[in-house]
Amino acid sequence: MNEGTLPHNFVLPKSDDDSDQVAVAAYQAGETVEVDFVVPAPGSYTYVCVFPGHAASMLGALRSLK
């Protein structure tokens, strides 16, 4: 939960090719949700905050081992 004064989001696109389209949709959503998901296969999945100015420093990778 974001308890700060700046808005944030968490975008986990299906692939790097989907990043731009997913970023626009996430930015426009503007609501709080809780999400459960199943990682489809072991690997590394990019996530990012897409609010203006955040993506350059608020990104990382979700790594699934199983």
Image (cartoon, helix red, strand yellow):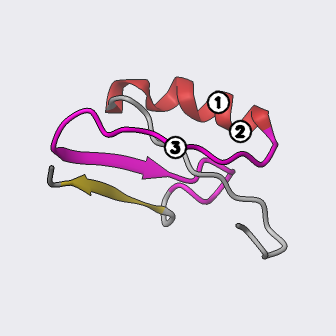
Residue 36 tag number? 3
Q: Alpha-carbon distance for marks 2 and 3?
A: 20 Å
Q: Residues within 10 Å of mark 2 (few under 14, many from 20)?
A: some
x 58%, y 35%: residue: 23
Residue at image position (45%, 32%) is 19
Whether pointer 2 and pointer 1 mark residues with C-beta atoms closer than 8 Å, the reply is yes
> Pointers 2 and 3 in contact (CB under 8 A)?
no
Dominant SS type (magenta): loop
Q: Please say whether residue 43 is one of the residues in the magenta stretch.
A: yes
Marks 1 and 3, how far apart at CA: 21 Å
Query: Does the segment drawn in magenta span residue 9?
Result: no
Q: Residue at x 77, y 33 (%)?
A: 28
Is disc 3 surrounded by few (<14), some (14 to 19) or many (20+) residues within 10 Å?
Answer: few
The residue sitting at 57% across, 53% down in the picture is: 49
Q: CA distance from mark 2 to mark 1?
A: 5 Å
Answer left or right for 43 relative to 46: left
Q: Earlier in the sequence, mark 1 or mark 3?
A: 1
Where residue 36 sits in the image (x, y, percent)? Answer: 52, 43
- Residue in front for this viewpoint, 43 or 34: 34
Against 53, residue 33 (above or below) is above
Residue receiving disc 2? 27
The percent position of residue 46, horizontal first and vertical second, equals 35, 47
Of marks 1 and 3, the one in the foreground? 3
Q: Which residues are magenta?
A: 30-55
Amino acid identity at mark 2: Tyr
- Position in image of residue 25 (x %, y %): 66, 28
Dot 1 corresponds to which residue? Answer: 24
Instruction: State the SS at label 3.
Output: loop
Tag 1: amino acid: Val
